[in-house]
């Protein structure tokens, strides 16, 4: 198997790359902006799992480069993981349109741009799988991170549509909905300890969803139930909550 | 959040920061008033506790591997378990391993951990070729036996008090199998087990499980476990699904009667005076790793693991005294482990010295502090010392008398600005 990981410098991205290297002996194409850090990650995975890796520069928000990026990949991957993302800061994003736009551009527009290109290829080849890292933040808007949540929510809906479109071509689309994860992205946040997963735990959940042919996976599993409750709260009450 | 060491005593409120790279470490050191580094939190007491903790777990890249020489370089947050999983199938194992594989490389260096082969191969630092250390001002220093020697010998066994260990280069050992040929020998008392240790000095691995409650003529009743690497080229191994202790046992679970019963059954399990079998590396070195959170069996108040070493010439007499004290106190120790150490190394405050070491688990209970203070006195009378990685309560004087090079260590810390920036609860308590 040849797996393309977009956003391979992210903790979850590199953990998923590691899981596919470990369990599938997958050769990896690791893509991200920071090549220096990517080189170290690639070497780590090569040593641990004796697989081949290739690193390649990719910028999610530089949309016009996406077509060339994918055209230049040879051979084409059997699967792709979209793991890049940008959390930003809600307060910043409220005050600065640039920051809000960056949140949308990275988490949604960038993901859509590259996935449309890849989906076309998978569709014509009638094979392939797509794993998209969305977020439980996209399940319902909350004052503490609704701009990020809106971007992830759009991405979740996009993935759902893509799954529907590609089903007849035997191309699988897996939506991953992580809750709190201990990563670079969340390092500055004070998260409730018992609810926090490690990137490796999320990667294990993603890999097992892949094996079990699931469409949607919450990680960790209890977020399915937490979100069920959060989504069930009537808006008239929800709007008063400090979430 | 509330954190503690593996012994779950003491528990303190702390904020934890897990940097992903070296520049984040540098920023953090600038920002915080003081901090201590922590890996997987397997030191028992307060040596990795401070209100600010720098957790090394996200510094977890394997940087290089030379498969001809068996030399690896990795960041300090990589665990020994990860190294075993990666390199054992290729015929490489750790030269020295402690009784759990869930420690980080940084932690293994800082505690200069030892294993069942100390009498032959020394402690973990013997396998350390070099490491990179960040000082409080953010400067990174490469330390080895030939470069920045003083910092090298201070950092190995230095309990993380000489700076942040960022990465290390380590020598692995070639093995021909993932299995151990194990021999278990029964010893009826302390004299017998001492004779057996001496007799089997050339065996690669040796450790004894000792029944601390046995009295009078049975005092020191034990099982000596010996091991040599198998050579069958069988590298199949599986780290099977772990059992775990889901909640704190009521603290009454372990009392002198249940422990006595366990000890008798365990001793008699070795039916013959000598038994031989083949055991996987994982079960030979890490029997307790098979049970996640085994520390919860001692109840929510936690426990102390009391480990000391006595110089060889005074070991027999000193141990007789200590075992007498422990068995009459009735403060049952579930697990007691006896081991003969080899020669002391050059590190400033590493624990091992040539002689016998005993490790006792005791749950926190009324009377425990008085008992342990009393044991401290016996240990010092016989020129012994306590292991910093297990300690949560020794007094400054006990430490300073046991570790004659402590002042040199302290001076080095003052000189490099470490005593202001890098501290643990333990370092403050014992005057380091």
Image (spheres, coloured by chain):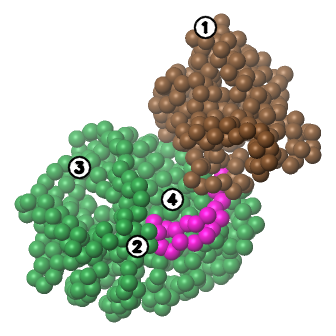
What x and y, as percent, mark residue B146? 54, 66
In this rendering, does residue A99 appear at all?
A: yes
Residue B285 vs B174, above or below: the answer is: below
Q: Contact (CB < 8 A) between labels 2 and 1?
A: no
Q: Chain of mark 2?
A: B
Observer-side mark, 2 or 4, equals 2
Residues packed near mark 2 inside 10 Å, few (<14), some (14 to 19) or many (20 plus): many
Which numbered tag is attached to residue B303?
Answer: 2
Mark 4 secondary-structure assignment:
loop
Q: Tell me how far mark 2 sits from mark 1, CA to CA.
A: 60 Å
Residue B90 in picture, x, y percent from top left: 38, 40
- Residue at the far left in the pictured view: B272
Residue drawn at 70 percent across, 40 percent down: A233
Shown colour of chain A: brown
Q: Colour of chain B?
A: green
Q: Are marks 2 and 4 on the same chain?
A: yes
* Distance from Cα at disc 1 to Cα at disc 3: 52 Å
Q: Nearer the viewer, mark 1 or mark 4?
A: 1
Subunit ID for the residue under disc 3: B
Q: Name the mark on residue B323.
A: none
Q: Quadrant of residue B123?
A: bottom left
Residue under label 1: A168
Q: Write the residue at 53% across / 85% down.
A: B430
Helix, strand or loop status at disc 1: helix
Give the residue pinned by disc 4: B40
The reply to whether callout 1 and callout 3 are in contact (CB within 8 Å) is no
Q: Which mark is residue B279?
A: 3
Residue at x 43% of width, y 50% of height: B81
């Amino acid at each position: 198997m040849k797996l393309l990981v977009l956003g391979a410098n992210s903790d979850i991205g590199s953990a998923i790359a590691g899981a596919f290297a470990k369990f599938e002996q997958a050769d990896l194409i690791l893509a991200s902006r920071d090549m220096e850090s990517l080189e170290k990650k690639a070497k780590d995975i090569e040593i641990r799992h004796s697989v081949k890796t290739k690193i390649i520069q990719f910028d999610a928000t530089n949309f016009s480069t996406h077509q060339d990026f994918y055209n230049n990949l040879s051979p084409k991957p059997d699967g792709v993981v979209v793991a890049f993302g940008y959390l930003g800061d809600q307060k910043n994003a409220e005050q600065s349109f640039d920051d809000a736009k960056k949140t949308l551009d990275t988490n949604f527009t960038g993901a859509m741009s590259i996935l449309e290109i890849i989906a076309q290829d998978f569709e014509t080849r009638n094979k392939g799988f797509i794993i998209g890292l969305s977020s439980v933040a996209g399940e319902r808007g909350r004052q503490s991170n609704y701009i990020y949540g809106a971007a992830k929510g759009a991405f979740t809906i996009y993935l759902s549509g893509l799954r529907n479109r590609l089903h007849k071509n035997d191309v699988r689309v897996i939506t991953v909905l992580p809750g709190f994860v201990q990563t670079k992205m969340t390092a500055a946040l004070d998260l409730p300890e018992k609810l926090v997963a490690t990137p490796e735990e999320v990667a294990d959940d993603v890999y097992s969803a892949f094996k079990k042919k699931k469409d949607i996976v919450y990680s960790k599993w209890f977020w399915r139930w937490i979100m069920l409750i959060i989504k069930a709260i009537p808006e008239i009450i929800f709007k008063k909550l400090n979430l | 959040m509330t954190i503690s060491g593996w012994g779950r005593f003491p528990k303190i409120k702390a904020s934890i920061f897990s940097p992903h790279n070296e520049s984040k470490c540098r920023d953090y050191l600038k920002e915080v008033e003081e901090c201590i580094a922590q890996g997987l939190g397997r030191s028992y007491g307060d040596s990795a506790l401070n209100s600010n903790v720098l957790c090394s777990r996200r510094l977890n890249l394997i940087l290089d591997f030379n498969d001809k020489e068996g030399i690896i370089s990795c960041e300090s947050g990589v665990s020994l378990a990860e190294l075993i999983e990666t390199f054992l199938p290729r015929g490489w194992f750790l030269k020295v391993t402690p009784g759990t594989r869930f420690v980080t490389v940084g932690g293994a260096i800082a505690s200069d951990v030892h294993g069942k082969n100390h009498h032959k191969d020394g402690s973990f630092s013997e396998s350390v070729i070099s490491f990179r250390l960040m000082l409080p001002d953010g400067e990174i220093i490469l330390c080895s036996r030939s470069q920045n020697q003083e910092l090298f010998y201070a950092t190995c066994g230095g309990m993380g008090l000489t700076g942040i260990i960022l990465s290390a280069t380590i020598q692995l050992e070639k093995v021909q199998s993932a299995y151990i040929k194990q021999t278990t020998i029964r010893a009826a008392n302390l004299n017998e087990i001492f004779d057996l240790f001496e007799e089997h000095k050339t065996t690669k691995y040796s450790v004894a499980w000792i029944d601390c409650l046995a009295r009078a003529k049975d005092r020191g009743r034990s099982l000596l476990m010996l091991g040599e690497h198998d050579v069958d080229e069988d590298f199949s191994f599986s780290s099977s699904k772990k059992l775990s202790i889901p909640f704190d046992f009521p603290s009454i679970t372990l009392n002198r009667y249940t422990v006595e019963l366990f000890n008798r059954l365990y001793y008699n399990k070795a039916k013959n005076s000598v038994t031989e079998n083949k055991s996987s590396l994982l079960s030979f070195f890490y029997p307790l790793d098979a049970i996640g959170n085994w520390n919860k069996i001692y109840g929510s108040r936690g426990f102390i693991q009391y480990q000391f070493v006595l110089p060889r010439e005074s070991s027999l007499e000193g141990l007789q005294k200590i075992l007498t004290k422990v068995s009459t106190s009735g403060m049952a120790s579930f697990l007691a482990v006896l081991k003969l150490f080899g020669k002391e190394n050059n590190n400033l405050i590493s624990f091992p010295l040539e002689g016998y070491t005993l490790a006792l688990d005791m749950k926190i209970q009324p009377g425990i502090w008085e008992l342990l203070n009393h044991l401290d006195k016996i240990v010092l009378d016989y020129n012994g010392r306590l292991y910093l990685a297990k300690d949560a309560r020794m007094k400054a004087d006990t430490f300073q008398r046991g570790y004659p090079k402590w002042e040199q260590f302290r001076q080095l810390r003052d000189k490099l600005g470490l005593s202001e920036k890098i501290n643990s609860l333990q370092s403050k308590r014992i005057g380091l």
